[in-house]
Structure formats: structure tokens, C-alpha cells
Amino acid sequence: MFEGTSCINDPIIISPDLAFRAEATTGEGSIWHPDRNTLFWVDIEGKTLYEYIPDLQNCRSWQFDRMVSTVVPETDSTVVVALQNEIIRVNLTDGNTASIAPIPDNNGKIRCNDGKCDPSGRLWIGTMGFGAPKGAASLYCVWADGTVETKLTKVTCVYPPCISMVLFYYFFTKKSCVFRLFFPFFPQCCTFSCLISKSCHVSLYKYCRNLAIFAH
């Protein structure tokens, strides 16, 4: 593992320590829970949510009946989880779950992929088709009341969003494109820009620039 930035000519190489041997199938989506001082992550194909507890050097886990693709902290006792075709709330104390919103899955051909919350508490979740067929994926915005807004369609794989206070980054795996959305406190002023692209089509870029309602 490297420590430093791309501007450092001689990065320091750090040897990682094994924290927990989970033997997961597809471990992804790690995120720190600031209220619990623990690390959450998911095993997508293993249909399992994990919470790593550093003080105990061990994990708690929750099993689901569908793939689980991402997790975000909500309160000190709850997290929001994206299942294969649904956003749910998980009570970490008793394990109970509550549905927040369904996500379209095209009769089982699409699943949720990665997602993150913005400063307003909205969950931005991308999808992908099984086998990553071209044009099958979408990007959704899920509000706290369960309202789901479709923000982008006919892309291949939206993965993963990264959100700061005023900037929203995401990339298309198949297109090798990184896009940045600027949304200040007035959503109507939001703007799009393409940061990095190996094969970004002009039509896609123009389409994204027209999404003035993206963060509204």
C-alpha cells in the first residue's frame, strides 16, 4: 500500500496488517461510522453486512435474502443499506429492518451497486445489470421519505459516487469517465464537468450538462 499523493515521486510503502479474515466473496463498500467508531462493509454476493469493531478485533454481521451492495451510517443505532432491489434501514440493536424505497430491477436483471449520501441526507445509488450489459444502469436519488428520483439512465455501470460539501463525483466503468457535479446551496445553479475520460462520447457529456435538475 502507498502513502502520499500522486505528486510524490517516492511514496512510502506500508505493509498492511490483517484486521479480520472474513473469507468474503465480494467485499466492498467500506465506510467508517463516526458515532460507533466502527467500520462497516458488505459482501455483495455473500449477502452479508459486516461491522468491524477495532477494540474487539472482530466483526458483527447481518445476513440478508438478497445481494447487499452498500451501506451508509444514519444514527448511532441504524444504517441504511442497499439490497439488490431495495433501500432499507437496519436497526443495529435488534436487527430489525424497515423498507425505505424499492429500486427498479427490470425483472431481476438489474441490481443496486454503490451509493453514498450527500450533505442533505439524500442517498445517491447507482445500478448495474448482471453481466454489465451496455446501457442497463441508472443513477437514482433517494430522499428520506422514500421518494426515488431517476437522475441518469442508459449507462453501463455507475460506480461509485464520492460526495464533498459541494461536489459530487462518479464514474462510468465501461466508459472510463469521471464526472463532477457542482451543486451549491442553490440546486438550480448546479453544473457538470467531465474530469477524466479515455473514451467519453460527446453526446453523453452534453446529456449530463443538461441535467440542471440533478441535485434538485
Image: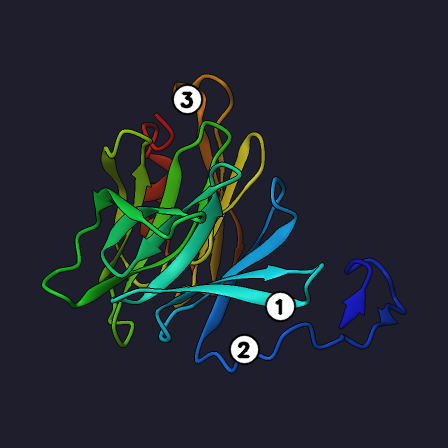
Is 215 displayed left or right of 59 in the figure?
Answer: left
Q: Which residue bears the numbered disc 2? A: 22
Query: Where's the N terminus, which quadrant?
Result: bottom right
Dots 3, 1 in contact, CB < 8 A: no
Is 67 displayed left or right of 77 in the figure?
Answer: left
Which type of secondary structure does the marked residue at label 1 adopt?
A: strand
Which type of secondary structure does the marked residue at label 3 adopt?
A: helix
Dot 3 or dot 2, earlier in sequence: 2
| Camera-side mark, 3 or 1 | 1
Q: Which mark is residue 58?
A: 1
Dot 2 or dot 1, earlier in sequence: 2
Relative image position of residue 18 (x, y in whole percent) = 70, 77
**Which amino acid lies under the numbered mark 2 shown in the image of this protein?**
Ala
Q: Nearer the viewer, residue 97 or 94?
A: 94
Disc 2: CA contacts within 10 A as few (<14), some (14-19) or many (>=20): few
Relative image position of residue 52 (x, y in whole percent) = 59, 62
**Which amino acid lies under the numbered mark 1 shown in the image of this protein?**
Asn
How far apart, in angstroms, are the residues tagged by discs 3 and 2? 42 Å
Q: Name the residue furthest top.
A: 186
Q: Which mark is residue 210?
A: none
Q: Is residue 119 above or below residue 137?
A: above
Q: Which residue bears the numbered disc 3? A: 187
| Camera-side mark, 2 or 1 | 1
Which type of secondary structure does the marked residue at label 2 adopt?
A: loop
Disc 1: CA contacts within 10 A as few (<14), some (14-19) or many (>=20): some
Q: Quadrant of residue 100?
A: top left
